[in-house]
Every structure is written in structure tokens, then in C-alpha cells.
């Protein structure tokens, strides 16, 4: 319940700010990809300004996520190898326990 309230307190104002940003920046702007002829229609794109801002934010989040994913790969690899080792040790412990039970069953009772 606290998480929902906290999300509401953060996401509602953020949503209101984003809607106000979109309404205030509806003017069409042209993004030119040709630095030598900016008026070239083939290598340019016209859209409202907030579209370009949102695209830049999305690309930034994707690049940041990919960088984090690749930088943490050594930790994931270590976790996988330690998990395999833990399973191996559990299997060996179970085998020793079974063997100890067999030996205890073979001992003469008093």
C-alpha cells in the first residue's frame, strides 16, 4: 500500500509536468541529418519538439540499460558458477548422508 501511495506521489506530478511540457512544445521543428545542406528534405524529419525530447530520453534509457547490463556481466557469470558449485556441494552432502545412513544401518545394535 505504501508503494502505491509513493508511486502516486511521484508519478502523478511527473505525469502532469510531462503533459504540460507536451502542450507547451507543440510547435513543429525540423531535425536535419545533413550538416552541409540543412534544407534537404530527404535527410530531415519534422515533428513536434516534445517527440524529439521523448525519443532522446528513450534512447538514453536504452543505452544506459545496455551499459549496465554489460558492465554487470562478470557478476552474473560469477553467480551462475557459484550456484552450480552450491548444487554440486548439496549433491555431495546428500550422497555422504545416504552413505552414513547405510553404514549406521549396518552397525550392530546394542
Image (cartoon, rainbow, N blue to C red):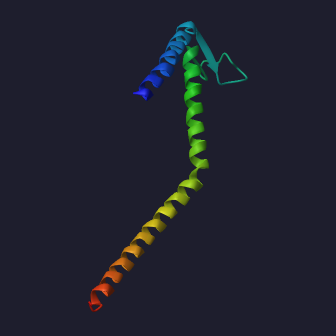
Establish if 50 lies above or below 83. Answer: above
Tally of marks: 0
Q: Position of residue 4 (x, y in %)?
A: 42, 26
Q: Residue furthest right?
A: 36
Q: Position of residue 2 (x, y in %)?
A: 43, 27
Q: Residue furthest front?
A: 110
Q: Which quarter of the figure has residue 3?
A: top left
Q: Nearer the viewer, residue 12 or 25?
A: 12
Tell me which residue sits at (68%, 18%) in the image.
38
Q: Residue furthest bottom?
A: 108
78 horizontally vs 89: left or right: right
Quarter of the image where the C terminus is located: bottom left
Q: Position of residue 86 (x, y in %)?
A: 46, 66
Tell me which residue sits at (59%, 48%) in the image.
70
Quarter of the image where the N terminus is located: top left
Q: Nearer the viewer, residue 73 or 36?
A: 73
Tell me which residue sits at (33%, 87%) in the image.
103
7 horizontally vs 73: left or right: left
Establish if 74 lies above or below 96. Answer: above
Q: Nearer the viewer, residue 28 or 102?
A: 102
Q: Position of residue 47 (x, y in %)?
A: 55, 15
101 horizontally vs 69: left or right: left
Amino acid at each position: 500500500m505504501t508503494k502505491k501511495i509513493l508511486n502516486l506521489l511521484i508519478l502523478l506530478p511527473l505525469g502532469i509536468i510531462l503533459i504540460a511540457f507536451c502542450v507547451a512544445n507543440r510547435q513543429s521543428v525540423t531535425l536535419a541529418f545533413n550538416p552541409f545542406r540543412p534544407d534537404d528534405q530527404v535527410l530531415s524529419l519534422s515533428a513536434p519538439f516534445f517527440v524529439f525530447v521523448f525519443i532522446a530520453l528513450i534512447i538514453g534509457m536504452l543505452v544506459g540499460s545496455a551499459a549496465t547490463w554489460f558492465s554487470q556481466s562478470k557478476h552474473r557469470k560469477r553467480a551462475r558458477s557459484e550456484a552450480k558449485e552450491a548444487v554440486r556441494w548439496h549433491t555431495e552432502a546428500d550422497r555422504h548422508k545416504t552413505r552414513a545412513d547405510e553404514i549406521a544401518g549396518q552397525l550392530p545394535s546394542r
